[in-house]
Image (cartoon, grey):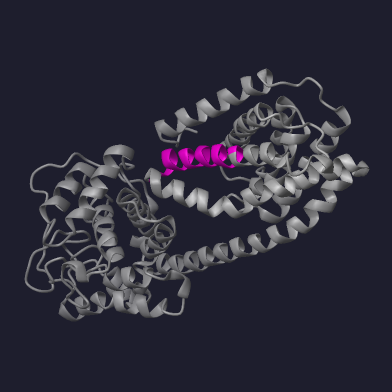
Amino acid sequence: MRTLPPSARIHVGIVVGGSVPALILLPWSGVDIDRLGALAVLFIAFGAVARARLTGLSGAPDGALFPLVCAAVPLLPGGAAAAIVVPGVLIARARAADPVAPVVNAAHLVLSVAVASRVYELLDGSRYPTASELPAKLVPTAAAGVALYVVSGLLDAALCTTTQGAARLPVLREVFVRSAGWRLGSVPIALMMAVLWQQRLGVFAAVLVLLPLYVAFWAYAQQARERAAHEATVRTLVRAVEIKDGYTRGHSERVARASVLIARRLGMREDRVVRLRYAGILHDVGKLSVSTRVLTKPGRLDADELREMQRHPVSGAEMVADLTFLGEAHGGILHHHERMDGRGYPAGLVGAEIPEFARVIAVADAFDSMTSTRSYRPARGADAAMAELRRCSGSQFDPRMVEALAQALDRHGWPEGEPAEGGEPARTPKPTGELRDRVPGPRGESPVDTHSVARGRVGGDS
């Protein structure tokens, strides 16, 4: 909780604080104890299944419970319907890395069910729907399902916006589009379950309806696991680079973090943000082709060594060429050392010729390099680093990317004193004197130093 931004803590406080009185004030009268008990057991059982099979897949554990959540609205009074979702979500999310996440997700669903139940009641929805009442009773159930989908989506998007610094519109689009099929498709399933429940099938109605539904969800989970495998592939490559070059330890993650901040300020689609994050993490993977002697040399690199170092973007792009899931990330990896004025490498691209991902990573790479402590110099403060990026804006860096990072930092800040080489905590001194430590660039200009004056590296993490 301490690591959450202030806006995220406010969100958590509001939703968790609001869910408690909702549970108390919502109607409980007329609840069928047998029905309540049967649904509670189903929530617990399916929550345990989701925890066992879907842990680690973003949104999957409590997403698996959504058909049951929809079914609870027509089957139970508002208070009871909201209450029984809690144990299922807490169990499904029990293995979450963040202990706050299960509580927040449960609070989101409690508030969503509260609104959906109220909508159902206002439209005179029946607590005991039967087949003879169809299709007239489709309206209140459908309205309640849409309300559940909208409110839960808004709450999830608000949490993502406050915790990750995402721009609102792209997050809303991603949350609602990603979940539309499963969540809206749960509405007729829930009504079918409620009607079958009344036909003397009781709890067996849930089993009859939900088992084939979970086959479909299993297919969705397989896609999510494929994405998890992509993540593992990326992590493996990064660890290999970190083992070879201790400087990169943590650097790649921070470049990815800054790249995502920039992308979200630019309003990129979430699927592109994911690929940009991969590009940021893998931008230095080409260092695996650079000799350890060059990577670890404490002094200035000679001309041949500098040329070897400057081949790492091409080598990196070749190493990941067969990873088709990276998409645009390939261009970001290959061209992250290009300059807006055409003096960069490997292709000497100018301005808009440089892929957008590469222009983002160039700024993120330089910013992290300047704000991280190295053995040959202390870290600069974030303000000093931004001043240097602005000084080189237009010639070396895309001004649009620089300003996007500045706006993101104004809103979300940046951890001061990132780890130094070898993993030791860094101390970030106040910048004094000349901010620019420069060395001759590959084409004669003196760009902002983002790695080492002594080693002769230029243009980011060379």
Q: Residue at the spot x=33%, y=39% of the render?
A: 412
> Is residue 422 left or right of 306 when viewed as pictured?
right
Would you identify the image quadrant in which residue 146 lies? top right
Task: Name the chief secondary structure element in magenta.
Answer: helix
Q: Nearer the viewer, residue 309 or 97?
A: 97
> Is residue 396 left or right of 34 when viewed as pictured?
left
Specify the farthest residue to the right.
200
Q: Which of 397 and 14 is in front in this view?
A: 14
Q: Residue at the spot x=24%, y=57% of the render?
A: 363
Which stretch appears magenta? 147-166
Would you identify the image quadrant in which residue 193 lies? top right
- Residue 391 image point, x, y percent: 10, 52
Q: Nearer the viewer, residue 51 or 312?
A: 51
> Is residue 424 left or right of 299 when viewed as pictured?
right
Vertical arrangement, residue 385 with respect to residue 338, above or below: above
- Residue 76 image point, x, y percent: 77, 31
Q: Nearer the viewer, residue 440 or 316?
A: 316
Q: Is residue 286 magenta?
A: no
- Residue 35 image point, x, y percent: 85, 33
